[in-house]
Amino acid sequence: MAAQQTETKSRTIHRPCVDIAESEKRIELWLEMPGLDENSTEISFEKNTLTIKGNLTESCSAEPDSGLFEYETVDFERKFEIAADVDVDEIQATMKDGLLHLLVPKKIESARKIAIEKRD
């Protein structure tokens, strides 16, 4: 029996597992993004929403005339509403072995003394 040829590839949207830790100074996130690297992942922060997207296109190296193809395109996406005031310019992201680590520092409002002016 001959294998059937698939003309279109399937597309899957995946929500990566996440661990989130929050302290007084920062929020840390760890996401499982297997098969992805820094070139196939996009991170953005807009209007208190942290968005993490990725795309993995799996394919076989051979290009046969016919066959059964079960490789697929996988889209990764997670969105997080961040209630804290975030220092957007200081957000850091690192990726190693498919594990994405984000460090999101909070803006720390330091107490300050307010001078009282003497009026005559």
Image: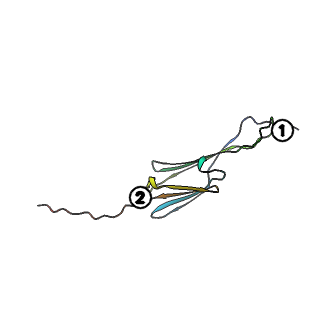
| Residue positioned 37% across, 61% down in the render | 109
Q: Residues within 10 Å of mark 2 (few under 14, many from 20)?
A: some
Question: Please, what is the three-letter code of the amino acid marked with disc 1?
Answer: Ala
| Outermost residue toward the left in this view | 120
Look at mark 2 in the image and give the residue it sits on: 107
Residue 75 vertical placement versus 8 (above, below)? below
Q: Residues within 10 Å of mark 1 (few under 14, many from 20)?
A: few
The quadrant where residue 4 appears: top right
Question: Please, what is the three-letter code of the amino acid marked with disc 2?
Answer: Lys
Tell me the quadrant of the picture where the C terminus can be found: bottom left
Report the disc number at residue 3: 1
Residue 26 image position (x, y, % from top left): 47, 61
Is disc 1 placed on a helix, strand or loop? loop
Residue 85 image position (x, y, % from top left): 42, 56
In the depicted view, which residue is nearer to us: 6 or 97?
97
Report the disc number at residue 46: none
Is disc 2 placed on a helix, strand or loop? loop
